[in-house]
Amino acid sequence: MLSANAQSAPAPARAVKQTRSADDKTPLSLFPLVQIWTLALNNALTAPPAYRDTYAVFPLEDDQLAAYDLASGSRLWLTPIATTVAPAIGADLVFVAESEMISALALQTGELMWQQPFDGELAGALLAADDRLILTTADGDVLALRVADGEMAWRRHLPRAASSTPAVTHSRIFVPTADSHVVALNLENGEIVWDRLLGGVGHDILASDDRIFLGSQDRFFYCLNATNGEVDWRWKTGADAIGLPVADNRSVYFVSLDNIVRGLNRSSGVQRWKAPLAVRPISGPLKFAETLVVPGTAPVLQAYSTRDGKPFGRYAVSTELSGLPYLFVDRARVFPVLATISSDIVGRATVTAATRDIEPPNASPSPLPNAIVVPPGSDPPGDLGDVSELPNLTPVVPASLQ
């Protein structure tokens, strides 16, 4: 029996569920995208473009080389140079392989800074690495030129030519070769640091100071120790893993020709997730925060979450891509900008830039539901006459006058 003076026990505290906006630190997705400008190059590309930061250099038909600032879509310069090899952009120079010549142009003006004779056949794109310009030849040579004047710093001959563009860190160059090897060279002097045989010819390499990642034609995706070349782990795929992988502190992400994008644990190689692709990929994914962007053979780019591989959205382009997309940071915008290249029926290239729009879409105001229209009064307001003073008013004297 309860006493009349007894106090009731306090009710247990009710758990309050945090809202998404209060406790969810997930970065916003790059998608949906909104087009912000287009740039008609009016010619077909003769080689893949070169990118760095907001700069782009396009090799074009009719022996033209054009440089643009992608932040504004404005042209920096146009010069008569013919090339069929992807250029490279350094800190303040553009490097171009012409016929029997390597040329260096000022990035801002296009002025010729130096030229060096070169009569070899290149195996791939030029690569700018700090104070070195790296070239690979069809004969198996790897050359390092000094960026300052084009003089040769060193030359290393390998048994077979590079199968893809090398990758660099602050001290090493990693070269996949046509005989299924990956060779690590000292960036300073070209000495061989290690040589690892894979089960197939290697593709593009993602290099860091501790590990390198690449797919190969034996349908494995490899993680090699960057110090000694030992295989840390490898993952079996249903088809070749192509293009350049991307990674963050926890995972590495890549695509394969069985139309799959995967996320693997960076340290152990354990698969975190995989997701089917709607179209056949043409290169590795691009990454912003927790968004992966995968280009394919159809005129659409698909976005996926790095957390679980779930689709994040789609971005359609006018025609099939004629060059690899590029993601860059424009400091005037909240989100990065995605640049894509497509071509018309005669091959003339157009560059399109798109980013996420944080402003709500403009919409015409709609009428309120169930609104009652008040008809205007039949009689206009009349003249009320002079307004008389209020009674019993006491004037207030400012303090300064007292």
Image (cartoon, helix red, strand yellow):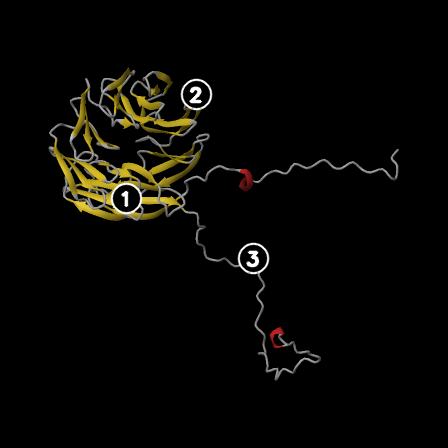
Question: Mark 2 or 3 closer to N-term?
Answer: 2
The alpha-carbon separation of the residues under discs 2 and 1 comes to: 38 Å
Element under disc 1: strand
Amino acid at the residue labelled 2: Val
Return the residue at label 1.
351
The alpha-carbon separation of the residues under discs 1 and 3 comes to: 45 Å
Is 194 placed above or below 54 here?
above
Location of residue 161 in the rendering, given as x and y in whole percent from the top left corner: 20, 22
Amino acid at the residue labelled 1: Val
The alpha-carbon separation of the residues under discs 2 and 3 comes to: 56 Å
Q: Are marks 1 and 3 in contact (CB under 8 Å)?
A: no
Residue 259 in view, yes or no? no
Question: Mark 2 or 1 closer to N-term?
Answer: 2
- From the viewer's perspective, is 16 left or right of 337? right
Badge 1: how crowded within 10 Å, few (<14), some, or many (20+)? some
Q: Are marks 2 and 3 in contact (CB under 8 Å)?
A: no
Residue 28 in view, yes or no? yes
Return the residue at label 3.
369
Location of residue 118 in the rendering, given as x and y in whole percent from the top left corner: 12, 30
Closest to the observer, 62 or 321: 62
Quarter assignment of residue 219 = top left
Quarter assignment of residue 147 = top left
Location of residue 41 in the rendering, given as x and y in whole percent from the top left corner: 22, 45
Q: Which quadrant of the rendered structure holds the C terminus?
A: bottom right
Q: Which quadrant of the rendered structure holds the N terminus?
A: top right
Residue located at (18% from left, 30% from top) = 145
